[in-house]
Amino acid sequence: MIWALLAIFFLSGGVSGVSGSMLTPEYVNQVSKRVDTLIPDAARASAAQQTLSELNQEAEKFKKIFLDSGEQLDKAYSDHSDDGSRAGRILDELNADWAVEQKAAIDLRFKLRESVTKQEWTELFAFLE
Amino acid sequence: MIKTHSAKCILTMIAAACVLAACTSQQESPDPVAVQQEIAANLANEVDLVRSTVSDADRANRVVGLLRERDRVISRHVKELVTYRQDMAILNDDYDAKRESFDQLLSAYNTEREAAQKELLGIITAMKKQTTAKEWQVISKYQLKRLHPRQNVYPDVKGGG
């Protein structure tokens, strides 16, 4: 059952898989690989890579938090005496951490936009179509 | 008949979500049909396990009912998730999208997601109340081994947040 709780978190853009969230390290890496070929201007490409590097750090940070919480949730789930309060606390903390992660990712999305033209932006994310 | 059909739809949805998950979570793509069959079998075995583990038939029925309630919550959330991820992808693609639009989308989705989490926590707690510590040990062990997110849930859907 805990899989369902985690699924709801996981499916929401947690750790792996291809997503448009820019929150997963895998996703950030895919975008990063395209930057140098799509952005001809070296200075802008460098700025974009720097932003993506920051984004990757955010994604990695939350990945660790998420994985650590999984072990705690497993224990709470198995614990027959837990009436949901322990698991609830873990999820509350995870939700709060995720909110911080989301905000940071959106901030960085707009920072990335500053070094990418409209046409480049379209091409940069077209690989997910 | 309708109930049976509905249950099959829910099972299919959950299995489909898990298959999508498994496809992107492993370096070598598994056979989606085989994975779907395995997940469906695990969900069916879960019911059998509950019936054979919980000593009292009435309590076992109540736990099985709770499993089905869990599946309904999950299937509902999967639909909302897919919509959310699509909306997020569209928004992210829009070079001129406003910050407020992201905040609104995330806020609405977070509210729904956290509500679903609370619903599931309630279902879990109800299942624990219907079982003894020993029975729950057997059931939860199976669930964590056979229906765990680390093996099952990584969606391959464009979008997300």
Image (cartoon, coloured by chain):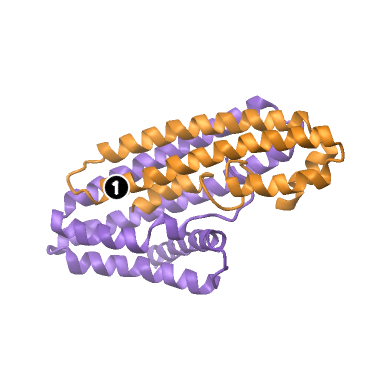
Q: From where the camera sits, is residue A19 visible?
A: no
Percent across and percent down for residue B149 are: 42, 55
SS at circle 1: helix
Q: Nearer the viewer, residue A13 or B113?
A: A13
Q: Residues within 10 Å of mark 1 (few under 14, many from 20)?
A: many
Tag count in the figure? Answer: 1
Query: Label 1: chain?
Result: B
Which amino acid is tagged 1? Ile
Q: Position of residue B98 (x, y in %)?
A: 70, 27
Q: Residue at x 35, y 42 (%)?
A: B119
Q: Look at the image and tell me whether residue B1 can be seen.
A: yes
Q: Residue furthest top?
A: B100
Foreground pick, A126 / A30: A30
| Quadrant of the drawing holding the C terminus of chain B | top right
Chain A, colour shown? orange
Color of chain B here? purple
Side of A82 relative to B27 (left or right): left
Q: Residue at x 82, y 32 (%)?
A: A43
Q: Residue at x 45, y 73 (%)?
A: B37
Q: Which residue is mark 1?
A: B123
In percent of width and height, residue A82 lies at 21, 43
Of B105 and A116, the residue lying toward us? A116
* B100 displayed left or right of A121: left
Q: Quadrant of residue A69?
A: top left
